[in-house]
């Protein structure tokens, strides 16, 4: 797969831009991260502060988590999963018995897509074309990291990796066949818990999220 990615780099650019137009000649974590900083494979770079690439244990990570896209705090800091959803994610990992230091965390889309609301920048769901444009970065990350377990957080990540027909609400917490890792599973994105309508709903959704993570932890 890495050889295929390298060969694609040499192909002439096509009207439908993608991350492949900005790939480095040598495929490794450092070169990918540096190259991604200059990615203009879709228009999201125009309003984002910076590219937010994946971070964590790079080689043979026990678990690789894939979310949707960086949020406001991630966009400003340049690090994935450090905002409100990231803090909830860390809490749930600890409760499930997973050490984040032994995992790799990234997103399907590397730039923050947002719309203004007063002085705030509000998350906006990326279009399918934007997910596709960014897909080569994610594919390369998976090949470099070679995770034992791949966890999709939310619909965007799950559909990017498992197909457009995948429904997290129906198939969460189940081990799935995929070409990306020996074990693949999907659950909700922690941001969806924060959007729950009231405290009781948040508590119930958080408990279900931790249950899914405990299924993952049991395989370590």
Image (cartoon, helix red, strand yellow):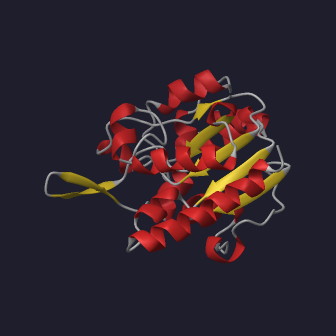
Judged left or right of residue 37, residue 220 is right
Going 71% across and 63% down the picture, which residue do you hit? 162
Name above or below for residue 48 compared with residue 85. Answer: above
Judged left or right of residue 28, residue 148 is right
Name above or below for residue 8 compared with residue 134. Answer: above
Residue 109 visible in the snapshot: yes
Q: Quadrant of the N terminus?
A: top right
Percent of width and height locating residue 135? 59, 49
Residue toward you, 151 or 50: 151
Residue toward you, 93 or 180: 93
Going 53% across and 51% down the picture, which residue do you hit? 133
Name above or below for residue 105 compared with residue 176. Answer: above
Judged left or right of residue 43, residue 41 is right
Going 78% across and 37% down the picture, which residue do you hit? 146
Q: Quadrant of the C terminus?
A: top right
Direction left: furthest residue: 118
Percent of width and height locating residue 6? 70, 32
Going 62% across and 66% down the picture, which residue do you hit? 208
Residue toward you, 22 or 52: 52
Residue toward you, 204 or 74: 204
Percent of width and height locating residue 66? 61, 49
Residue 134 visible in the snapshot: no
Percent of width and height locating residue 125? 41, 62
Count of marks, rendered view? 0
């Amino acid at each position: 797969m890495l050889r295929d990615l390298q060969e694609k780099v040499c192909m002439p650019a096509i009207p439908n831009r993608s991350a492949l137009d900005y790939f480095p000649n040598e495929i490794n974590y450092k070169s990918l991260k540096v190259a991604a900083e200059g990615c203009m494979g879709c228009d999201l770079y125009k309003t984002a502060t910076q590219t937010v690439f994946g971070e964590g244990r790079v080689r043979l990570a026990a678990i690789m988590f894939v979310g949707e896209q960086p949020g406001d705090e991630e966009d400003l800091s340049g690090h994935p999963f450090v905002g409100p959803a990231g803090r909830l994610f860390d809490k749930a990992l600890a409760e499930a018995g997973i050490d984040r230091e032994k995992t790799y965390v990234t997103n399907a889309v590397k730039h923050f897509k947002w719309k203004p609301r007063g002085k705030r920048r509000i998350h906006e769901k990326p279009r399918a074309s934007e997910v596709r444009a960014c897909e080569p970065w994610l594919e390369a990350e998976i090949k470099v990291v070679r995770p034992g377990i791949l966890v999709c957080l939310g619909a965007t990540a799950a559909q990017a990796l498992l197909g457009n027909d995948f429904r997290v609400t129906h198939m969460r917490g189940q081990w799935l066949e995929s070409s990306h890792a020996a074990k693949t599973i999907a659950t909700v994105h922690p941001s969806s818990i924060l959007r729950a309508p009231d405290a009781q709903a948040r508590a119930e959704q958080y408990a279900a999220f931790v249950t899914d993570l405990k299924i993952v932890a049991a395989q370590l």
